[in-house]
Amino acid sequence: MDELVRKNIRDLKAYSCARNEFSGKQASVFIDANENPYNYPYNRYPDPLQQELKALIAPLKDVKPSQIFLGNGSDEAIDLLFRIFCEPKQDNVVAICPTYGMYEVCADINDVEYRPVLLDEAYQMNADKLLSACDAHTKVIFLCSPNNPSGNNLDRKEIEKVLESFKGVVVVDEAYSDFSTQKPFRLELDKYPRLVVLNTFSKAWGCAAIRLGMAFANEDVIYYFNKVKYPYNVNLLTQQKAIEVLTNDQQKMHQRINMILDERQTVMEAFSQLPICQKVYPSDANFFLAKVDDANLTYNYLVDKGIIVRNRNSVALCNGCLRITVGTKEENTQLLSALRQFH
Ligand SMILES: *Cc1c(COP(=O)(O)O)cnc(C)c1O
C-alpha cells in the first residue's frame, strides 16, 4: 500500500488535533483547544474519528470499526482517493462509462487523467477491456454497482476479475446496494487488500441532507484517509443525527426500502406500457433508466408540469434516456398520468 501512495502523502506529517494528543486517562477540564467553555455541546470540537458512530456502523455492515472511513458524503472519499494515490499530470484512473459523474469531476479538479471505458449495450462491464485501458500510471479503477445511471448490478465475475488482476486500488461504489439482492463487496475486504467500497446515508437511509458517506477498506488504506482528511470532517450535528437514526430507525429504513422496491416494480411496468416508451432497463436500485421517443421533448414537457426527472440524453450509451427516481405512490402516479396525456 505504501508504494501506491503519493510520496508527499506518505511523508506527510498529519495535523494533530488538540484532543488527539491526549488519550487514555479520564479528564474533566478541557482547556487545550481554545474552545469556548460555554454553549455545550456545540462549543466542543467533534470526535475527529467518529468512534461512537463507527461502533454502530461496524456490526450493521459486518466490518471492523478500523475498516471504516466516514466523510462529508461519499464525495469526500472519492476526492481523497485522488489526493492520496494520484500524482497530478502524471497518474491516471480508469472507470466504467457511463457512470456516476463525480469520479470524473474529482479527476479534473485534481488534474488527473480520467480514462472512461464503455460498457456494452446492456450496461455490462468486460474486465479485460477495462484492464487493457490501464498502464503503469493507473492508480485507481472506479466501478459502481448497482451502476448510476443504468441501475443494474455489474457482473460479479467481471468485478472479481478486476480485483484479482489489477495492482492498484479498486473502488466499488455500492451507494445503491441496499436496494439490490447481490452480495455486497464490502464483505470481501479480507480477500482483496486494495478494495475500497463506498456506501452512503444519502439513499437507503434517506439522509442526503446530513452529508455522511462511508468508505470500507483495509486498515492501511483507512490510515491514509484519516491522514489526509480535514481534522473535523464530520460535524457534531451529523454524527448525532446518524447515531439517532442507526439506533431508532433501522426498522423504518427497511420498511421504506420495501415500499420503494414495490413501487419500483409498479412504476416500471406502467412506464413500459406508455406509448412514448421504447425500453425500460432492469434496475437493482431506487431508480430506473428508460428509453423514450424524444427524451428532450419529454423532459421539457414534464418540467412544465412541475415534474423533474433526470435527462440522460447526452450521456454515452444513454441516447434517448431519462433516469427516473422511484418516488412516493402519489409522486409516481403524477408522473405516469402526466405522461399518459403526452403525445
Ligand atoms: C448518490 C450517489 C452517491 C452518494 O453520494 P453522497 O456524496 O454520499 O451523497 C455515491 N455514489 C453514487 C454512484 C451515487 O449515485
Image: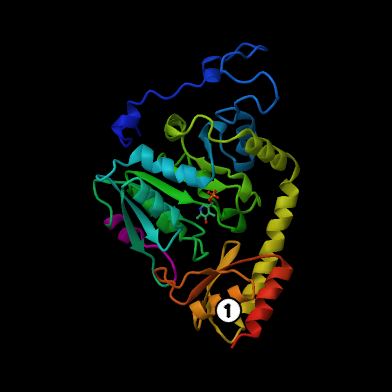
Residue pictured at 46% horizontal, 36% vertical: 218
Mark 1: few/some/many CA within 10 Å (<14, 14-19, 20+): some
What scheme was used to colour the molecule? rainbow
Residue for badge 1: 301
Segment colored magenta: 122-132
**Is ligand 1 less than 8 Å from the beta carbon at label 1?**
no
Place of residue 330 in the rendered image (x, y in percent of width and height, measured from the top left)? 73, 70
Foreground: 228 or 30? Answer: 30
Residue pictured at 74% horizontal, 46% vertical: 249
Image quarter (top left, top right, bottom left or bottom right) of the C terminus: bottom right
In the figure, 151 relative to 341: above or below?
above
Q: Could one spot residue 202 in this view of the protein?
A: yes
Residue 126 is one of the magenta-drawn residues:
yes
Residue 318 is one of the magenta-drawn residues:
no
- Residue 261 is left or right of residue 183, and the answer is right
Place of residue 297 in the rendered image (x, y in percent of width and height, measured from the top left)? 52, 80
Residue pictured at 45% horizontal, 41% vertical: 191
Q: Quadrant of residue 179?
A: bottom right
In the figure, 317 relative to 210: above or below?
below
Image quarter (top left, top right, bottom left or bottom right) of the N terminus: top left
Place of residue 169 in the rendered image (x, y in percent of width and height, measured from the top left)? 37, 44
- Number of labelled discs? 1
Place of residue 68 in the rendered image (x, y in percent of width and height, measured from the top left)? 53, 36
Q: Hey, what amino acid is under mark 1?
A: Tyr
Foreground: 336 or 157? Answer: 336
Residue pictured at 49% horizontal, 82% vertical: 294
